Image: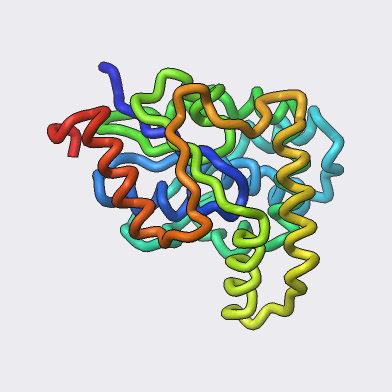
Amino acid sequence: MNVPVIAIDGPSGSGKGTLARLLAARLGWHLLDSGALYRLTALAALRRGVALDDAPTLARVAAELDVHFESDGSREGRILLDGVEVGAELRTETTGNAASCVASVPQVREALFERQRRFAVAPGLVADGRDMGTVVFPDAALKVYLDASAQVRAERRYKQLKEKGIGANLADLVAEIRARDERDMNRSVAPLRPAEDALMLDSSTIGIDAVLDQVMVWMRERLGEARH
């Protein structure tokens, strides 16, 4: 059976994770948050005291992850590791920066590659990440590259942290986001870039509801009304 896949790629903070969760819930499809897999690997490595340049051990950590994604219609969704919700821990800056380092390790990417492809089961899959359309699902029915300026992404993150009572410096966040973009775009394996046939969408000046509506229009054009 040819299972339809919608691949959503883009840099950190562009809104692709929220888009993927809302889209999967609306369609009743499965969800793959590939960035969370790298964050989960990084979190597990940090908890175990594994060095972020210890490729063989990191690959074993990645291969042993017991993870499940729940798209419950909320903008956050739930991520379960060993049956326990760990979403808050995955969203810390420490975990995010460690994940960017872990994602550049070829052995880790290899360990997670086939695992990610196995998420594509009926009735369909919404896959969110940085190389979903270019590497993991090159034959995806619809590929979206969601972008936003580094300044806007930093402001969004700053607001999120302030709402949680966490102190942050906006200038530092901008610098961290640009550094992460640089790492992701220039890594030797599966660098962050739009697929040649991806549809580009900039969320700098529009809200998530407008983004979701646009992607639904594209989906109807590519897959037809019968898919949802």
**Across the whole image, how many numbered discs are drawn on residues?**
0
**In this rendering, is residue 32 above or below 91?**
above
Residue farthest along the bottom direction in this orientation: 165
Q: Tell me if 160 is positioned left or right of 178 in this view.
A: left
- Report the residue at 63% width, 79% height from top: 162
Locate residue 143, reporting x and y percent. 42, 31
Q: Tell me if 22 is positioned left or right of 45 in this view.
A: left
**In this rendering, is residue 104 above or below 26?**
above
Q: Quadrant of residue 100?
A: top right
- Report the residue at 49% width, 27% height from top: 133
Quadrant housing the N terminus: top left
Q: Quadrant of residue 189?
A: top right
Locate residue 209, reporting x and y percent. 34, 59
Q: Closest to the observer: 47 or 120?
A: 120
Q: Closest to the observer: 196 or 116?
A: 196
Residue farthest along the front direction in this orientation: 205
Locate residue 105, reporting x and y percent. 76, 30
Q: Closest to the observer: 83 or 72?
A: 72
Image colouring: rainbow
Quadrant housing the C terminus: top left
Residue farthest along the left direction in this orientation: 226
